[in-house]
Image (spheres, helix red, strand yellow):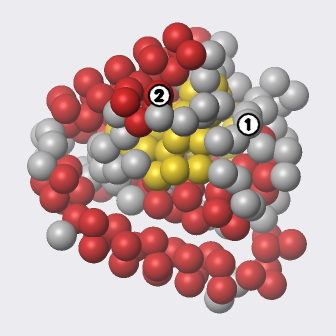
Amino acid sequence: MIRSFRRWVGLALALLFGVAVSPLFAQAAKPAQAAPAAAKAQAPVLLTSCGQSPGAVTVGVFLRRLQVDYDLKDIGTVKDLAAKPYKTLIIVTGSSLKGMGGAGVSIDDELSRAGALIAEARKRGITVIGAHVEGMERRAKNAAPGDNSDEMSIDAVCPKAQMLIVRKDGDEDGRFTALGKKFNIPVILYQKGLDLNGVLKTVFGK
C-alpha cells in the first residue's frame, strides 16, 4: 500500500512541478541563497529518507527534471550504497507515522538505517547531503502530541552531513542554521517549493 501511495504522490508532484508549471521554472526556480563554492555534489545519487516522509519523492521529481542520475530507495541500505559507484547520498529528514507504518518500520529503525548509511558513505568518500523540504509542516508544528520523531530524524542526519538543503520556512526557529554553524556545514536555504530546482541545478552543476 505504501508503494502505491508513493507512486500516487510522485505522479501528483510530477504533474504539479513538471507539467502544470513548467513554463514558470525559468523565472521561479531560483535559489533564495546562492550555494557556497564548497557546496557541490556529483551524480550518481542514492536518495532516501529518514522517517519515510514523501519529501524524498519531491527531491526526486527535481533530480529527474534536471537529468541527474539518481535512485530513490524507500528503505535504502548499506547494500544499496555498495551496488553502484554513488558519488552522493541525499537523506531527506522529517518523519511520517503513516509512511513508517506502511513500510513496517519504526523511527528507531529509520535512525539506525540512516546512521549506517552515513557511516558507510564516509568510508567510501561519498558526499552526504541532509535535506528538509517540507517546511514546519514536517516538524513539531504538525506533529501529534508527544511525537518528536521529526526532530529525531533531523538530529540523526544533519549534524553528520556535509551540506544541508532546507526550505526556509522549516528554519523559522533557526534550527538548521544553528546546526550549520555548530558543525561547520554549508546550509542552503530556499524560499518556495519550485526554488529547489535552482538549488539542485547549482549543486549538481546543471
Residue 27, image x, y percentages: 86, 72
Q: Quadrant of the N terminus?
A: bottom left
Q: Which residue is mark 2?
A: 82
Q: Please report the residue visible at 14 percent of the width from the left and 39 percent of the height from the top.
A: 106
Q: Earlier in the sequence, mark 1 or mark 2?
A: 1
Q: Please report the residue visible at 60 percent of the width from the left and 31 percent of the height from the top.
A: 85
Q: Across the whole image, how many numbered discs are drawn on residues?
A: 2
Residue 129, image x, y percentages: 58, 33
Q: Please report the residue visible at 37 percent of the width from the left and 30 percent of the height from the top.
A: 79
Q: Where 47 falls versus 126 (above or below)? A: below
Q: Where 150 falls versus 178 (above or below)? A: below
Closest to the observer, 47 or 136? 47
Q: Please report the residue visible at 60 percent of the width from the left and 33 percent of the height from the top.
A: 86
The residue furthest front is 83
- Crowding around mark 1 (Cα neighbors within 10 Å: few <14, some 14 to 19, many 20+) is some
Looking at the rendered structure, the kind of residue marked 2 is Ala
Element under disc 1: loop
Query: On the rendered structure, is 106 left or right of 66?
Result: left
Q: Which residue is mark 1?
A: 42
Kindly tell me whether residue 181 is visible in this rendering.
no
